[in-house]
Structure formats: C-alpha cells, structure tokens
C-alpha cells in the first residue's frame, strides 16, 4: 500500500489550509512588479510556502528555529525591498513563535519578530525622509500590536492542550493501575473467602470417611452439607471472576517484548506457544508475574539480553526468566515486587526461586490441578 503524502499534519485539521489564503496577497502585489524582481518575488513566495509547511512538521525539533528564521528573513526582504504591505505576512511567524515551550527561545523569537516588523518602517522613513501619516499609522499599528501579542495567546493555548494531553495520559495510566489492582484484589478475595470454605470441606470429607462405616446416616447428612458448601463456593468464584477480564500469557509476552525493546534489551522466547489448556486464573497470575519479572530486569539488572522460557508437563507449568545482568545482591532482601509475585503464586500453590548464573535466573513453578467429572460431581 502506497503511503499518502500529507500537505499538513492531520492533527491540525483545516486550520493550516485556511491560512493559505493570506499567501494570495503577496502574489497579488507581485503581479504589479516586472522583470527579475517579479521572478525573484515569486520564488520567495514559493519558499515562504515551503517554510510554512515545514514549520508544522518541525514543531519541537531543532530544525524548527531554522525554518522560522528563513520565514522571517523572507518577510524582511519583501517589506524592505518590495512593499511595506508585505509586513502583514508577520501573522505567520507570530503563530509559530507561540510553539516554543522554553521561555528563552520564546522571547528570542518574539524579539526577532519585533525587529523584522519595525525595521522596515525605520528603513522607509529614512529612505523617504517622511514620517508615516496618521492614516497610515491607524492602518498599520493595530495589526502590529496584534502580531506581537498573538504569540502569547498561541503559547497559552498550546500549553493548555499539552496539559490536557498529559491529563488524558495520566487518567489512562490511573485506569490501568485500577484494573491491575482490581485483578489482584479479586485474586486475594479468592484466597481469603474460599480458604475457609475449602478448609471446611476438607475437614468434612475426612469426617465422612470415618463415619461411613459406623454411622451411614450421619455420613450422608455430612455429604449433603458438603454439597451445599461446595455450591456456595462455586457461586463465590463466579461472582468474583465474572467481572474480571483475564490477561493471557500470550498478550503479556507481547507487552514484555515491547518493554524490553524500549529499554534496548534483546529478547528471546523459547518453549510452548499454546496456552489454551492453562486455566484463566492461572494465566492471569502468571502474566502479572512475568510482567513484574521483566520490569525488574529493566530497572535493576543492567542486562543487555533476556530470555523467557515456558514449559508444560502433566504435573506443572514452569517459567524461567534469565538475564545476563549483574546478578543478585544477597545483602538486599526481596523488594515489594518480588514479595508480590510470591503472594500471587501462593494463591495457586506456585513457588518462586531466584539464583545467580551468568546473571539472574528467576524460576516459577505452578502445579496443574486435574479435574475429573464423574456422575455430575467434581473429584
């Protein structure tokens, strides 16, 4: 697919195109010129249009000042050597001076604009040896004032837009943090709320085993109570998980690859590619642990390469994150991130191991719980 050529950046909408109307005025004045002066004038108008276009694309870059200086120079040449009315082209650089975020550059640009606007009047006054009439002053002065004030308005508007953009980014980041915290909260609720229920079921199952031989009626009663308790536990699980969108391991590995690439750390993945048999809750917790491990590699390891491998067996899932960084500092205890990983893995009976081997090796092992359906019951 061919890449389309844009005249102006799309985020500015129709505004740059509306301003193009004012370039027709110098074209009109040049139609009254003749010879080489007219030809040079048309060339400068074309160059002025190029500077106008490039200033939109160069905003925030080093070349922005060079294009702005060229635009001011063209206005100066037109106003001094052609016609004083060309001074109204100053509205173009006045708009772009407001794009400067740094105060020194902004005031330097404003001073350059003032010099370009005022020097032609001084030149024509010396050349003609006559001062401007009151009608000419009323014609030029209000527009000159507007041109010198407008950079402040544009700068204020751009700063407000920048603040709004940062606020949107902050809100998105907060929303993401809230989602992550909610997932962790749900995982903890699963542990806290179901822990007592599952312990009760374990005790009752042991009691039933003893009562089967000596008191079958009571054993049946206890079994019915176990069924009621297990149904209540299933209801709790559904309530807790119903609003939670699981982060899959595949999605997280893509995010990790982007994170490491941004930190200029090469990345290699090895192992399983099909995670469909891993339960959603396990995928969610493993994904959060992988993300935390990758974040630690970026922040603390000083590594240049990171390898992540995942293997599955009938009994367990094993994840290994290995970087070639500085390794573990045995004098430092686990940070909050690693403690959080241990807490999450504990919810699914997983364990975490750290070692140093040509860098840091982080190993996670999670047992696979097999479920068998038999006569409508889970065993």
Image (spheres, rainbow, N blue to C red):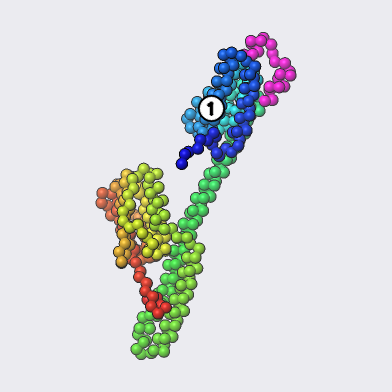
The residue carrying pointer 1 sits among few (fewer than 14), some (14 to 19) or many (20 or more) residues within 10 Å by Cα, namely: few
Q: Would you say the magenta stretch is mainly helix, strand or loop?
A: helix
Task: List the single residue furthest toward the right.
Answer: 135
Task: List the single residue furthest toward the left.
Answer: 357
Residue 46: percent from the left, percent from the top? 55, 24
Q: What residue do we see at 53% from left, 27% from top?
A: 50
Residue 361: percent from the left, percent from the top? 29, 53
* Quadrant of the drawing holding the C terminus: bottom left
Q: What residue do we see at 67% from left, 9% from top?
A: 129
Describe residue 257's horizontal placement relative to residue 80 as left or right. Answer: left
Q: Pick the residue in front: 289 or 21.
A: 21
Res 355 → quadrant: bottom left
Residue 122: percent from the left, percent from the top? 63, 15
SS category of the residue bearing label 1 = helix
Query: Can residue 309 be seen in this snapshot?
Result: yes
Residue 13: percent from the left, percent from the top? 59, 38
Q: Pick the residue in front: 305 or 185.
A: 305
Q: What residue do we see at 62% from left, 33% from top?
A: 18
Q: Which residue corresponds to mark 1?
A: 50
Describe residue 366's horizontal placement relative to residue 4 as left or right. Answer: left
Query: Can residue 319 be seen in this snapshot?
Result: no
- Is 277 drawn above or below residue 39 in the view shown? below
Reply yes or no: does residue 157 show up in magenta.
no
Task: Please count the marks in the image.
Answer: 1
- Is 379 drawn above or below residue 143 in the view shown? below
Q: Pick the residue in front: 369 or 374.
A: 374
Describe residue 183's horizontal placement relative to residue 372 as left or right. Answer: right
Q: Which residues are magenta?
A: 119-143
Res 341 → quadrant: bottom left
- Is 77 drawn above or below residue 308 in the view shown? above
Describe residue 78's horizontal placement relative to residue 294 as left or right. Answer: right
Q: What residue do we see at 32% from left, 64% from top?
A: 316
């Amino acid at each position: 697919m061919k890449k389309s050529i844009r005249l102006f950046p799309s985020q500015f909408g129709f505004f740059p195109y509306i301003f193009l109307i004012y370039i027709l005025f110098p074209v009109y004045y040049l139609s009254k010129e003749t010879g080489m002066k007219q030809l040079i004038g048309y060339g400068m108008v074309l160059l002025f249009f190029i500077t106008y276009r490039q200033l939109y694309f160069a905003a925030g870059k080093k070349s922005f000042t060079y294009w702005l200086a060229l635009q001011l120079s063209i206005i100066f040449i037109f106003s001094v050597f052609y016609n004083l009315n060309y001074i109204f082209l100053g509205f173009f650089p006045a708009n772009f001076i407001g794009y400067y975020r740094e105060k020194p550059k902004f005031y330097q640009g404003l001073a350059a604009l003032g010099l370009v606007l005022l020097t032609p009047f001084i030149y024509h006054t010396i050349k003609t040896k006559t001062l401007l009439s009151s009608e000419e002053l009323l014609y030029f002065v209000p527009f000159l004032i507007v041109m010198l004030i407008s950079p402040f308005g544009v700068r204020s508007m751009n700063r407000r837009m920048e603040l709004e953009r940062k606020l949107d980014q902050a809100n998105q980041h907060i929303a993401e943090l809230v989602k992550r915290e909610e997932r962790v909260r749900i995982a903890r609720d699963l542990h806290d709320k179901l822990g007592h229920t599952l312990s009760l079921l374990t005790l009752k199952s042991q009691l039933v085993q003893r009562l089967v031989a000596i008191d079958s009626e009571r054993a049946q009663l206890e079994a019915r109570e176990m069924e009621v308790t297990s149904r209540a536990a299933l209801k709790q699980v559904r309530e807790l998980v119903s609003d939670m969108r699981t982060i899959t391991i595949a999605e997280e590995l893509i995010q990790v690859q982007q994170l490491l690439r941004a930190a200029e750390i090469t990345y290699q993945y090895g192992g399983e590619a099909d995670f469909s048999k891993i339960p959603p809750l396990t995928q969610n917790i493993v994904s959060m642990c992988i993300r935390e491990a990758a974040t630690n590699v970026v922040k603390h390891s000083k590594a240049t390469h990171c390898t992540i491998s995942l293997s599955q067996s009938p009994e367990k899932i094993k994840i290994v994150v290995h970087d070639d960084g500085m390794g573990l500092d045995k004098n430092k205890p686990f940070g909050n991130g690693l403690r959080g990983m241990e807490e999450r893995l504990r919810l699914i009976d997983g364990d975490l191991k750290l070692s140093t081997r040509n860098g840091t090796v982080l190993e996670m092992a999670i047992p696979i719980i097999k479920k068998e359906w038999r006569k409508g019951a889970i065993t």
